[in-house]
Image (cartoon, coloured by chain):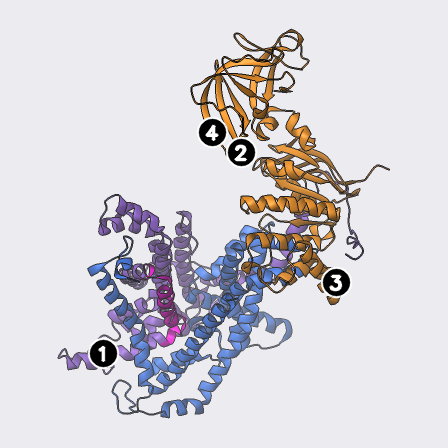
Amino acid sequence: MTPAAAVELRGVSKRFDDVTAVDDVSLQITDGEFFSLLGPSGCGKTTTLRMIAGLEFPTAGSVRIFGDDMGLRPPNKRPVNTVFQSYALFPHMTVHDNVAFGLQMRKLGRDDVRQRVASALSLVQLEGEQRRRPRQLSGGQQQRVALARALVNEPRVLLLDEPLGALDLKLRQAMQLELKDLQSRVGITFIYVTHDQDEALTMSDRIGVMHGGRLLQVGTPEDIYERPRSPVIADFIGDTNMLSATARHDGHMVLGPGQVVRANVDVPPGAQVVLTLRPERLRLFPARDSVDPTDNALDAKVVRRVYLGNAITYDVDAAGVTLRVRQRNAPGQRSFAVGDDVKVAWTTDAAVLVDR
Amino acid sequence: MAQVLAPPPPDETTASPGAEAGAERARSRLGVLIGLPPALYLVLLFVVPLVIVLVYSFATRGPTGQTILADWNVDAYARLANPLVREIAFRSLGYAALTTAICLLVSYPFAYFIATRPAAVRNLMLVGVMIPFWSNYLVRTYAWRVLLSSSGPLSQLTELLGFGQTRLLFTSTAVVIGLVYGYLPFMVLPLYAAIERIDHALVEAARDLYASGARAFWKVTWPLSRPGVVAGSILVFIPTLGEYVTPAILGGSKTTMLGSYIVNQFLSARDWPFGSALSLVVMAVMLIATVVYFRTGGRTL
Amino acid sequence: MSAAERMSPTRPGGVTRRLLTAHAWLVYLFFYAPIAVLIVLSFNQNRMVGIWQGFTLDWYAQMLDNTAVLRAIRNSLMVAAISTVVATVLGTAAALSLERYRFRGRSAFDSVLYLPVIVPDVTMAVMMLLFFVRAADALFVASGARVGLGISTIAISHIAFNISYVAIIVRARLAGMDPVLEEAAADLYAGRWQTFRRVTLPQLMPGVLGGALLALTLSLDDVVITSFVSGPGSTTLPVYVFGLVRRGVTPLINAVSTVMLVASMVLVAASLLLQRRRAEP
């Protein structure tokens, strides 16, 4: 039996006055998966999430949760809970009352509530903090209370709106793994909104990339990273080199005068294409070294060197084409200086074609 | 955890291209529901009375002071042009302007001083301003009646110093003093709010760019505090125009202001149409002044 | 603070500072001297208010015996209580509907709501008087009942202007409240009334109380409007004192005034203390 779609959006659009925030988005999210909506600020991902939550209503299209068309149903009648970007903890209530809120609204008995609150707090590793108030907690702790407050209601779908944005890097990275763990343990569907592509790549089963209100591509992290379908996606996800080229016969591409490379793509001769190359797929050699003839190679000069700790990036100029090369900072790796003459090489299957 | 809780049962589902329209309708219905009681109250007990006054302003005063609504005319409004009314109007404008000016001159250094104190002192000083403000206005004006009387403490002081008895009561001076006393907090608070809001970094930048203390004030602080000056001036000038209690207690027959003149029409002169016309005109003037203030970008007070 | 710290480029120093300090003291003197004189003179044995003759509590005793004064106090408190409660409820409702909802007629309502604040006392007094006169007429024609001016007319008038003041204050507080809290409540299955009672109202309380305090003060203070719409026997304290003052200055008035002053100051001090306690965890 095919698993039911936990959440389905069909042709959903949202317009505010003359701004189209969400443009004809159709999407199916499977039960139990960790799904991320990824995109830059203003791309419509938060608005889409809010339409699933019931905090906004679509101008067109429908939202279905486990097959039920949500229609005009307000948020308090939907089997979803939200973790807000600013946590939205009730400042005048204790941690216990915050977490208990949803249960109290559904009229559970006091002992039952207390028990569930306690287990929700231990799930997020905050046991014993029931009596504190939000302002007495750190950012990370507040974030976990917000999580507990949502999870205690056992929603079938949990919506998270950039919950880790306010945390510093180390804490954020730790929380990412914790959330992923939590999701696998609890087994419910997570829909996660973020602008941080590392975050999306780390945590998600599948990612939906949004830009300008439209859903550009849906796929696994590997799909998105290795096979981006448009220059926008390629550019947004990770660092990438984009090369314009004219196709010749047999997979040969002309970048510029005297620069012919081979790629594993099938396009008619004469077509104008854009090739994307990940910086970590490029290798640098001293100009005098010889390179494997089956690989592509260009002559270039180093114009910039940036030391990143765990890696070094070099920007090289190959007759007008600038390429960024990323080298792991490992023992035995050759180091280059600005001004060095080099050869930059990559395998023929490294370049990915994208539609213009 | 215990067994999975069932989601709450749905109560309405509709197929939807665009649930937005329905949701907005429902929301606006709720807004109307909440806003209806106060709106109805205001319509019934403010708008309707206003209309009634308007109607009365076109009526005629009968020989024994009763109002004859059947006789329509604009006599009441025509009388607004007569010299006595003009005299009173100009006097009111003059008092209001003088009061505003004095309040501004006194309040600005005061508000500036408070704004430059450390936080704890600031709050204490503001509370010190608020306490007389919250106490009864009538009583505070009466206090000046006592203070300024020719047998009062001030008079005794001047006698002691050889200046003889004060003859301030029932003069314009007394009225203006009373008005300034009553409305000073209305100037201090907006001024303080505006000055306090100024980003100190701007003044620091001015000093960093070789301005002296005085120049930094003149070129940075003063222009940026102007919204507070305007707000405070409006808050003092407009209500002062319609003042009644202060001139009634501290003034005499020669200091009649618009407020007392209007009240007279209803108590002694029994000329309700004229009184109605007058009160409408005074209101109209204040309304126009306020609208002008907001249209020219005045901040909400 | 050290002397060096006190001298910052953004604070006045030296002579300017001394002048400003002196000015500030003078202003406070200006504010409090009349009040102080009034309080002191209320203990004056002399009938001639200005000239001190000895300490006495006679005037306070007289005040407690004076039925007119006591009745005026009772009337003031009754009117203030009624008008404060009703105006606070209606004003809060008005603020909520304008700030959180959109509907047709919203801007009209918005404009009408601000009118009572702009309209001068005297005009409002005239408005209410004429309204009650006509309403009484209409009622007589309809049912033969004769209604006069009294506590109810005063309360009704006070509510009319207090709604606006409460609405302004509550609205300011509401505007500063992040609607995300109410969204979170709805997300957690709270219905609209529950959201209001458990999330919006507790957050709004300082504004509601501030509005209520203002309404209370304005009601207790009002002279002009009340004098127009009160009948015999329903005079409030300020109107009564006003009548006395027109007839001349006596120490009795001082005593009554002192009581009013002290009462209002205690009220304000109490509310400030309450605010401070609420702010602390």
* Distance between mark 1 and mark 4 Cα atoms: 81 Å
- Colour blue maps to chain: C
Q: Residue at x 48, y 62 (%)?
A: C116
Where does the C terminus of chain A fall, quadrant-wise?
top right
Left of C281 or right of it: where is B187?
A: left
Q: Which of marks 2 and 3 is nearer the N terminus?
A: 3
**Element under disc 1:** helix
For disc 3, the chain is A
Chain to which the residue tagged by mark 1 belongs: B
- Provide the residue span drawn in magenta: B114-139
Q: Which chain is orange?
A: A
Disc 3: which residue:
A107
Viewer can see residue B51: no
Look at mark 4 in the image and give the residue it sits on.
Answer: A306
Foreground: A315 or B289? Answer: A315
The residue drawn where x is 33% and y is 77% is: C35
Q: Which of C176 and A35 is in front in this view?
A: A35
Q: What element carries label 2?
A: loop
- Identify by letter the chain in purple: B
Q: Mark 2 points at which residue?
A: A310
Residue tagged by mark 1? B154
* Residue furthest out toward the left: B162
Query: Closer to us: mark 2 or mark 1?
Result: 2
Q: Position of residue C12 (x, y in %)?
A: 25, 57
* Label 4 vs label 2, nearer the camera: 2
